[in-house]
Amino acid sequence: FLSMVWAVQSRFEEAGLAIVLSALLDGMDGKVARLTHTASEFGVQYDSLADLIAFGLAPAFLLWQWQLEGLGRFGALRLARFNISTAVTGKRFFIGLPIPAAGCTVVAFLYFAGILPEFFRPALPYVSSIIALGLGVLMVSRVRYFSFKEYDFLRAHPVRYLLAVMVIFGLVYAQPRLFGFLLCAVYLCGGLY
C-alpha cells in the first residue's frame, strides 16, 4: 500500500524500496510460522493474498505510474496455480516465475534505469511494456525456477556457498542499481536455460 501511495506521489525509488522490503519480509514469514508452529492453511491463503498485493498490484501500479501511463492500458492466476501445485511439484522448484521475483525485477529495472544514458530514456516506456508482458507470461508459464527452499547445496558445499553469497552481496552493495538488475536477469534467464 505504501508503495502505491509513494508511486502516486512520484516517489518511485521509495515505492520500489517498499516492494523490496516486502520481499525480505515475505522470505521470513513462512519460516517464522513454521518455527513458532503457527502455520495454517489460512496462513497459506493469506500469504498469497499479501503476495498478490505486494508483488502483483504494487509493482504493476508502480510501473504504470513511472512509465506506462503515457502509452495508454496480469498475477492472481499465477498464485492460484502455485497454491495447488506445490503438493505435486515439491518445494525445490517453482513452476512459473514466482511473483516476488517478478515484482523485484520491476523494482530492479526501475533502479537500473537511473544509470542508463540519457539517449535511452525515450525507449523506457516501450522497454517497460516488454518487461511487464514478459514477466506476466513467465509467471503463468511452465518454466521451472529454483526455489531456494531446500538447501542441499548449502550442506554439500558450505564454504563455496558462503563465498558465493558474500561475493554476490558485495557486488550488489557496491553497485546496487547495476548488480541488482543483473541478479534478477540471471534468475529469470536461469529458468529459461
Image (cartoon, rainbow, N blue to C red):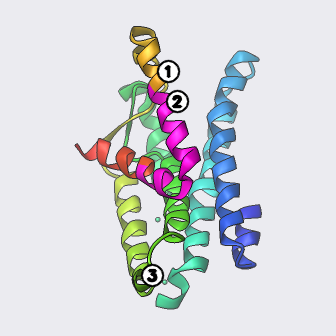
Using the numbered discs, state the Cα–Cα distance from disc 3 to disc 1 in whole angstroms: 38 Å
Image-quadrant location for residue 57: bottom right
Q: State the quadrant of the N terminus.
A: bottom right
Amino acid type at mark 2:
Met
- On whether residue 189 falls in the magenta region, the answer is no
Residue positioned 61% across, 71% down in the render: 61
Image disc number at residue 162: 1
Q: Position of residue 17 (x, y in %)?
A: 68, 57
Residue annotated with mark 2: 166
Q: Position of residue 79 (x, y in %)?
A: 50, 47
Placement of 50 over or under 53, stated as above or below: above
Front one among 176 and 53: 176
Farthest residue toward the top?
156
Placement of 132 over or under 95, stated as above or below: below
Amino acid type at mark 3:
Pro
- On whether residue 170 falls in the magenta region, the answer is yes
Q: Position of residue 129 (x, y in %)?
A: 41, 75
Placement of 67 over or under 82, stated as above or below: below
